[in-house]
Image: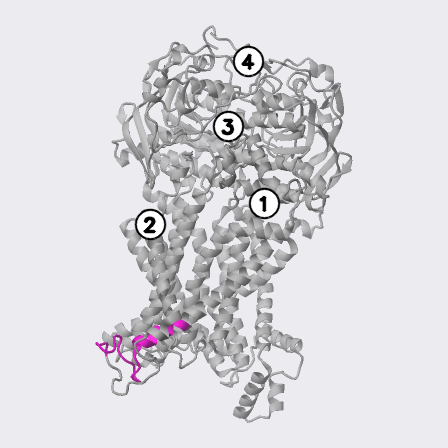
Amino acid sequence: MSDVAGHDVVLDVRDLSVGYRTRGGEVQAVRRVSLRVHGGETLALVGESGSGKTSLALAVMRYLDGSGRVAGGAIRFHGEDLLAMAPVALRKLRGSRLAMVYQDPQTALNPAFPVGEQVAEALRLHLGLARREARRRTVELLAQVNLPQPAQLYTRYPHELSGGQQQRIVIAMAFACNPELLLMDEPTTGLDVTTEARILDLIAELRTRHRSAILYITHNLGVVARFCHRVAVMYAGELVEDGPVERVFARPLHPYTRGLLACVPRLDASKRGAPLAAIGGGLPSLITPPPGCIFEPRCPERAPICAERAPAAAAAPGGGTVRCHRWEELPPFRTVGASAGTGPAPEARAPGLLHVEDLRCHYLLRRPLADVVRRLPPRAVRAVDDVSLEVARAHTLALVGESGCGKTTLGRAVVGLLEPTGGRIEFAGADAAGLARRRPRDLRRRIQIVFQNPDATLNPQRTVGETLARPLKLFGLATAAGGDERVRELLRAVHLPEAYAARYPHELSGGERQRVAIARAFAAEPELVVCDEPLSALDVSVQAAVLNLLVDLQERSAAGYLFISHDLSVVRYLADRVAVMYMGKLCEVGGVDALFAPPYHPYTEALLSAIPLPDPGSVQRKIRLEGSVPSPVDPGPGCRFQSRCPRKLGAVCETEPPPVREAAPGHVIVCHIPLEELRRVPPVIDHRPAATAPSGGP
Amino acid sequence: MGLTGYVLRRVGLLVVTLLAISLLISGILELLPGDAAEQILGAWAERSGQTLAAMRVRLGLDQPWHARYLTWLSGVVHGDLGRSLALNQPIAPLLVERLGYSLRLALPALAIAGLASVVLGVLAAARPNGPIDHAITAVTLTGVSLPAFVTGSLLILVFAGWLRWLPSASALLQGEGFAFWMRMLALPIATLTLESLAHATRTTRSSMIEVLKAPYVRTAVLKGVPRWVVLFKHALRNALLPTVTVLAFNFGWMLGGIVIVEQVFSYPGLGSLVLFAIEQRDLPLLQASMFFVASGYCVANLVADVVYALLNPRIRYA
Amino acid sequence: MADAVAASGAALPREVARAPGRPATLLVGGVIVGLFVLLALVGPWIAPYDAEVFHGLAKMKAPSGTFWFGTDRYGRDVLSRVIVGARTTVTMAVAGTALGLLAGALIGLLSGHLGGVVDEVLMRLMDIVMSFPSLLLALLVVAVLGGSTANAVLSIGIVFTPRVARVVRSATLGLRGAQFVEAAVVRGESDVYIVFRELLPNLWPPIIVEGCIRLSYAVLLSVSLSYLGLGAQPPTPDWGLTVAKERAYLVLAPWTVLFPAGAIVLLIVGVNLLGDGLREWLVARKTVRE
């Protein structure tokens, strides 16, 4: 990370408090937070849900909704008081010197206007450019953000662009007038990993060119490590620690920061080592916050003084501040054991439980009128194309890929939510293809699923107990009397209090609902559980706890997992074997250790190089994929990845389907490139051991 | 290709729908209970001095239902909508004439209601729960709660009864000139307008409020766009979409309301013709006028759909 | 549970996002509607006079101490007629709405859940019925069957069915993608179970809200039909009918028209307030339940 030269303070937030009026009282979303952003630097504002980070950003932009208000403190932008500024002056400031980039680009762009117009509007408004000049400049800007064919793209509408392209438009709009400060609210959440990497590169390039300061809001510690100079950690409305990124990651001082860093799975840790350190408990009430330290109820290091008095900010060695009574007494921080306890890789597998052979799931598209007239056959979306894989008892096969690769479709086919177009699905020797309704009852019991979204996964009109009792009743697993006891057992198994049986889903937090969903899946005593991105919608600290739960349950029940995910760090931790999919086909399958080391399939290599790692000390090779995922409609005969592959050999990749080659027993790569060449590729990630005292800069 | 294809599909759907409607109307009329049919037939036979049998042939009742329907349908295609029993004249020219009168009420009402509802809806939504919003909400709530005949009666009471500015009935349609027509039409148009205005304003207001919550509005504000530009350019453009749909729906409601309004003001339009047909049990007239009005509604919906597609880039540039 | 999430879209912490609406709307609406339902039930017994009795010496009298709402041209007490008239309007409106809700909800549920051909066919049918303006269709039905209270109820039910079906269908479709429904499918639950035990309990809010909207239109429709002479038949003191009959005396004896008209307006206002209030209350409950 280059040294930050600017010393001028662009944004100065002092003792800011933000509250929202509700019927129950005032929710104090932000309490006396102070931070500063200097010219040219990027400050990360990190926190989970409920931390108040978004409220803070909205307060800076003076865009708090009706019931929100700034309850105290000051916000200064280059010395000017933002809170006292007149609306006219504020308007001139916004979009020109102070700009914002949003989380969901699809909804941030107006669907009724061409994208070029929306960027040009900012130019005309603030720089007073005439129409033609503004258009010319906009096309330049679009080229700057690496959008293809910028002149034609000018007149397109948002819905015609991909997610990555839309975000580039939003970024172009933000940088259009050379802002001094940018507020970015999770701009890459929701984008694919490879797209995210390119957007981050773009922002880095633009911030250097425009010398902008950035307040970057995120919950993703990997992005913070890669991209930001300083970091401020918020918890439940308060700033608990801040400082230079290297210092905070190497020597976190506040127990919450330490907890956060400890519960993110590293790319060098696996479940065979120690369980992830999770942070127990939940957020305190923000209407009546406790008198002492806000983190005290959940803090593993708490002492009596912590409940009595709120800690003051202390200067931290190495830069920044920390607010904790006991920070000086805590032992040095160690990351969860890198490769600690690497037990025997489970290559010697138990007999396969689930066999998927040459599975196909194709959808036919509705033919446009022109095609019907010309008697052309309907085009097919080949969501899953000739995929074969196996899951063994008590083992986890992770299915990895980005959006549109077909992993979710495959999972749904296995579970019986859709019918495959071809191929076989076999479970414990019996044919299992087809809709769940038509499968024998016993088979239905033995294959279960855990979904992604905890908000929709439970029937809001049923209590937890009723939800858990249903599979018991349906599959005849418990008598009426025994059922209650079994429900209590299930709740205990997922670490929820027995009293929850009488509660409704809306009374539970997201993480708790996901646990109930897991309990529901295990109530049927399954042998195979398909997990469809079960962690994606959860906070980092909650993810760790649920991940530990999944590991625990697998050990106890010997169930196999088909774990679908796009998050390679989680996969590294949890999986025994990994299968990488791209556009409906498999690229690489192998044991988890083998997959994360060379030889790689070029796509796996690109994926690994794109993940932001929460470790500023590690070195990661940089491989970026151009363009976006092509449409899976009628793909060509050759390799699916060839249009973006940085290692493309030539015409053979387009015309011939790539061969399946075995790099080692149990490790298969599907690529034209000879294995010897792939073996010579250096590893993508080089982990330095987590040092306690880094020797200076990166 | 997106837009043209869309319009073509819509027109095709329209034709099918019109066929289905005509079938439905015919079907319903067939449901006339047997003895009632006999009664009607007998009454008409008497009035026109023909035998029952001749009456039967004239109405095509000697043929099976589908033949009757097809004859009627082919007549429609050729522009012949049959003959009215009660008035003993061809129906088609009668309908067209009455249509002209009704349009003189409906079109101004639609135009005023459409424009005013957009303005009022935007004003109300600009500051929800503010004083202007409360006032507009109260007025529109009353507006939707007043049936057309109540509004009409009240207007007659005030303007014709007490103030004596305007006539209460348009039955005596003698006179020429714009001023004459204005006096004749003012109250009926006002009645029709008020009812539609209330509905349309409520919809515009709520769709505007929804739109103002949208993230792209936030983007515009945080880009430094002035408040009124945000309202009238960024937000309204998207809020217009449901408004177009609501105006089409309103037109339909107006087609019903016009029956009442013409009854209240004794106005010789399409609506009173329908009522007349019902009272007189003039089956051919009833069938033709119902079909005519329903078709008008379908065409209006088609126009609304096309306008919607024009305004919505997602459909236009699919 | 204080799960204060500042969602970027709505810019508000979750627990704050729906500060509950003023319960006044619900209350006032409920009171008004309740009053009219009460009148419908016990009207004839609490009216000061018999609604049909002619008071020969007191024809066309303005409101006074003896006759609070005045008398009409036959000397009948307007107040009593208004009170007794509540019965027909309320009954017609409620019955028509109930009919429409029942048929519409059934069709909407089936269509939304089963999908495919069934959905296509049902929805095309509904579209055709909906391509008639409401009053016109009601008129058509009544024209064929003859004017009466029962036929008015039937026509209202027919007019409402497709509109209710659309709303229920789209709510069902929205739920169909919900993961708890998919979990039930994975368990292999039967269609009947899914529709009645998983979907229906979550559909009450939109059905209730739609029901209230329909009720206000039902009152409008039944009153309009009666005005045209095609709903309630004389000598019932139905409000719409009365306004039609007394029209000629609008200027001479406005109270004969204004009081029944006022009752109509008050009832519709009450139903609208009730509907608005219910919608706010249900939305607030539902969002908090997230």
- Viewer-nearest of discs 4 and 3: 3
Q: Relative to residue C247, is residue A497 drawn left or right?
A: right
Q: Which residues are magenta?
A: C62-87
Q: Give the percent coordinates (x, y) of residue A593.
A: 66, 18
- The amino acid on which the numbered mark 4 sits, given as a three-letter code, is Val
Q: CA distance from mark 4 to mark 2?
A: 58 Å
- Asked if marks 3 and 2 fall on the same chain, the answer is no
Q: CA distance from mark 4 to mark 3?
A: 28 Å
Would residue A452 be seen by someone viewing this image from the given angle?
A: no
Residue C181: image tag:
1
Quarter placement of the N terminus of chain C: top left
Q: Residue at x 38, y 17 (%)?
A: A303
Judge whether C51 appears above or below A686 on screen.
below
Residue, far right: A429
Q: Give the percent coordinates (x, y) of residue A383.
A: 67, 37
Judge whether A217 appears above or below C109 on screen.
above
